[in-house]
Structures are given as C-alpha cells and as structure tokens.
Image (spheres, grey):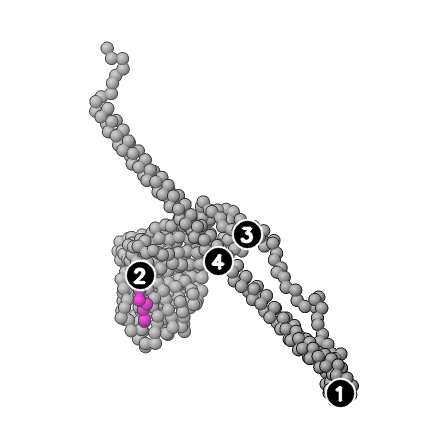
C-alpha cells in the first residue's frame, strides 16, 4: 500500500516543464552575468595595459625632456663663463703687452747706457749726451697699474644641491593611478539628428570645475572635443541616424590644470530622422545639413516649413536662435498640423507659434500670456502631449486636444491646442520679415 498519494502524471509533467523553463531562464541569466563578468575582466586588463603604456611613454618623454633642459642649462652657464673670461681677461692682456714693451725698452736703454759709460767721458761724450737725451724722453718713473687679485674676477659655479631634493619631491608626487574616473556618463538620449549626453560625478571627494566631452564614430580611431564647460549635459548635433557613436567625459578639479582620467566610453545612436528645413525657398539659405535656416535679403515672404512632418508628440522640439535681425510682430516660430502655402506667418489656424516679440499664438489667436522677446542665443522649446483623441461630436469642437508647453528664457506657457483631426506627426516652420535671423532646429 502506497503511503502518500502521488501527484497525477499530468501535474508532474507540468511541474517538470516549469522547472525546465526556470532552469533555462536561470541559465540565460547566468550566461548574461558571465558575459558581463568577462567584459569587466577585459576592461580591467585592457585599461591596466593601456595605463602601463601611457606611464612608460610619459616618463620616457619626461626623461628626454629633462635631459634636454639640463643640457641647455649647461650650455648657457658655460657661455656665461666664456663671456666673463673674455671680457675681463682682455684689459689684463693689454696691460701685459704694455709692461712687456716697457721691459724691452728698459733693457735696450740699460745696454746703451752701459756702453756709453764704459767708453769714458772724453771719448764717448756724444754717446753720453745722446743717451742722457734719450733717457730723459722715456718716463722711467711711469708704471702701469696692475690690479690686485681681490679686484679681478675669480670665477666659480654656484650649485644648489637642494634642487635634487626639490626635484625628487616633485617626481615622487608626479602622476597618480586612478582605479575609477571621478565622472561617468549617466544617460544617452536620442534626438532627431543628435544625442543628449548626461554625466555625473561618482567621486564625492572630487570638486569639478569644468567638464570635457568627446565623441567619435565607432569606426573612427580618434575622439574629438565637442564640449568644455561647467554643465553636466550637452546635446551633440550632426549625428547620422542609425550610426553608433562613442562618448566619454573627464573633469578638471577646482584650481587644477590637468584633466582627470576619462570615463568608460558609452555607445549610443539615434534612430530618429533629423529635422530639416525645406530646400529651394527663395527667402532662406540653408546649411549643408539643412538644420540651420538663415533669412536672406530676398524680398519673398512666407513660411519656411520642415521638409517632412518629423515632429512627434512626446518629443521636445528645440529652436536655437543663432543671430537676429530686425523684429516684426508677424514673425513666427512654431509647429503646425499641415503645410498651408499662401500664409505669411504661422499665426493662423491649425498652428501654434511664438513671435519674436514673445507673443504666443494658438490657431491664429494671441494668448494673454507672453514669453520674453527672442534674442541672439535664445532657445525656444515645444513639448506636446496628446490629451484626448475625440470625435467630430466632441463638445470641445475638435477631434484632438494636445497639451502644449512652450519654453524660453526660463519661462513657459502651457495651453491646450484643439485640432480638427486626429494628431499625427507635425510640421514645424518659421517666418521672418527682415533678413539676419538664423535658426537651428533639433
């Protein structure tokens, strides 16, 4: 007789299947963790190898530079010795020549005098007279001044041995090995034609003064600087869609000149189509990537639209005014449900916009609330969210209601925008009546 009732075969089979699935899931998780562990090991080994190479190269370069500097200093000091020797020995050489000439003259005079004396007075009277006359013309009591040893240079080298201790202290403190960079990239956010890079400090004891951001295509060999400043966020533009890029950041400590080690490179890409202005509009000149529009001197007026409806609800659309011209109340920067040619401004139905004087228009009607006037460097952002998608019988008189937030100069206005049809991707546009306005969209 069986002691306990065994589960039904179907139950056992189901439990077995569940256990197999759990084991498979556990195996996958372990595999992913193992892969992560291997990547961590590879990062440690590769970074250690790179650090060794950097240290060796740096100290070899330092030794070469120090040797060159010491050689240059030695040459300078030897030249100083040569200069002092040449300048101070020349007067002494001239004095020596003068004395040697005097010695020769005195020797000749002595010989001539001795001959005259030995000849006797009667026989050598002419010689004695000539000798006396000659001797009187030579200043036998005039002697050149010879400087004392204490008055002439005595060269020596003044070498401060303490420099060895100073250099040694600096060398022993030169360079550090960091196991972790003080900053790391925190987030990569894709934008149309760009990527927002955000970073943060991971070392609480590190006080950052500036940050330095670099990027490159994953197929490129070298990083290039794209931002240096105190902000912890930057949008990198001119990003090709569906192309992988690497980003890294470092920091400079407060009061320091050198940069910290680089963060671990992060890879990101944007799948969003870049925003572009429509080409061929006579009144506007476009950049090569067609994301910058400049109002030129052409007399034609009207709205410059985007080349396609590339703005979707839930995204942030940004306009940055690079340069300004003469403002006009009819100027406009904004979004619309569809292109409508024949209008001179976006201050019309089925559009929301801001004028360069800060006035906000919704479906052609000016709002009570205003934003600051647009100036050079101003950034205007549009954030739109779908609130309701109604029917033609909606009491609100539209098939779609969108919540719009327009921000500029740390101020914003929020309102509901009613459209006659369901919301899809939107166009953006701008219109300026005078030349000089340049607008970047991203």
Residue range highlighted in magenta: 284-289
User: Closer to the N terminus: mark 4 or mark 1?
Assistant: 4
10 Å crowding of disc 1: few (<14), some (14-19), many (20+): few
Residue 336 relative to residue 57: left or right = left
- Disc number for residue 170: 3
How far, Cα to Cα, is label 4 from label 1? 85 Å
Tag nearer the camera, 1 or 2: 1
Give the x, y percent position of residue 294: 35, 70
Quick check: 396 above or below 135? above
Circles 4 and 3: CB atoms closer than 8 Å: no
Asked if the magenta segment contains residue 307, the reply would be no
Residue 275 badge:
2
Q: Secondary structure at mark 2?
A: loop
In percent of the image, x 66 and y 73: which residue is there?
A: 96
Residue placed most toward the observer, 4 or 389: 4
Mark 4 / mark 3, whichever is N-terminal: 4
Q: Quadrant of the C terminus?
A: bottom left
Q: What residue does disc 4 label?
A: 65
What is the residue that sits farthest to the right in this orientation?
A: 121
């Amino acid at each position: 007789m069986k002691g306990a009732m065994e589960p039904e075969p179907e139950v056992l089979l189901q439990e077995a299947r569940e256990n197999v699935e759990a084991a498979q899931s556990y195996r996958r998780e372990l595999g992913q963790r193992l892969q992560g562990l291997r990547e961590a090991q590879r990062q440690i080994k590769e970074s250690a190898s790179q650090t060794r190479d950097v240290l060796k190269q740096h100290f070899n370069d330092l030794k070469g530079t120090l040797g060159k500097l010491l050689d240059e200093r030695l040459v300078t000091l030897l030249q100083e010795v040569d200069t002092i020797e040449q300048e101070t020995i020349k007067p002494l050489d001239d004095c020596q020549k003068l004395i040697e000439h005097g010695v020769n003259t005195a020797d000749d005079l002595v010989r001539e005098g001795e001959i005259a004396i030995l000849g006797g007075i009667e026989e050598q009277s002419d010689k004695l007279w000539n000798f006396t006359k000659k001797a009187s013309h030579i200043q036998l009591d005039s002697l050149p001044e010879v400087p004392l040893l204490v008055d002439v240079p005595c060269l020596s080298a003044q070498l401060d041995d303490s420099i060895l201790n100073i250099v040694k202290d600096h060398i022993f403190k030169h360079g550090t090995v960091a196991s972790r960079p003080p900053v790391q990239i925190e987030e990569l956010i894709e934008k149309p034609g760009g990527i927002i890079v955000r970073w943060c400090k991971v070392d609480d004891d590190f006080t950052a003064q500036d940050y330095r951001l670099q990027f490159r295509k994953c197929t490129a060999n070298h990083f290039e600087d794209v931002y240096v400043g105190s902000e912890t966020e930057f949008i990198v533009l001119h990003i090709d869609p569906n192309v992988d890029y690497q980003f890294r950041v470092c920091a400079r400590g407060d009061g320091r000149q050198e940069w910290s080690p680089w963060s671990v490179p992060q890879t990101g890409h944007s799948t969003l189509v870049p925003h572009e202005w429509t080409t061929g509009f006579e009144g506007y000149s476009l950049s090569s990537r067609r994301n910058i529009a400049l109002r030129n001197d052409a007399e034609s007026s009207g709205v410059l639209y985007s080349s396609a409806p590339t703005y979707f609800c839930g995204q942030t659309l940004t306009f940055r005014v690079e340069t300004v011209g003469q403002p006009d109340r009819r100027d406009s920067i904004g979004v619309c449900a569809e292109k409508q040619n024949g209008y001179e401004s976006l201050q019309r139905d089925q559009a929301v916009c801001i004028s360069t004087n800060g006035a906000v228009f919704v479906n052609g009607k000016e709002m009570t609330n205003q934003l600051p006037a647009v100036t050079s460097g101003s950034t205007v952002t549009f954030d739109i969210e779908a609130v309701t998608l109604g029917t033609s019988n909606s009491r609100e008189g539209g098939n779609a209601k969108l919540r719009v937030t327009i921000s500029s100069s740390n101020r914003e206005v929020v309102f509901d925008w009613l459209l006659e049809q369901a919301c899809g991707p939107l166009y953006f546009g701008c219109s300026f009546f005078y030349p000089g306005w340049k607008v970047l969209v991203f």
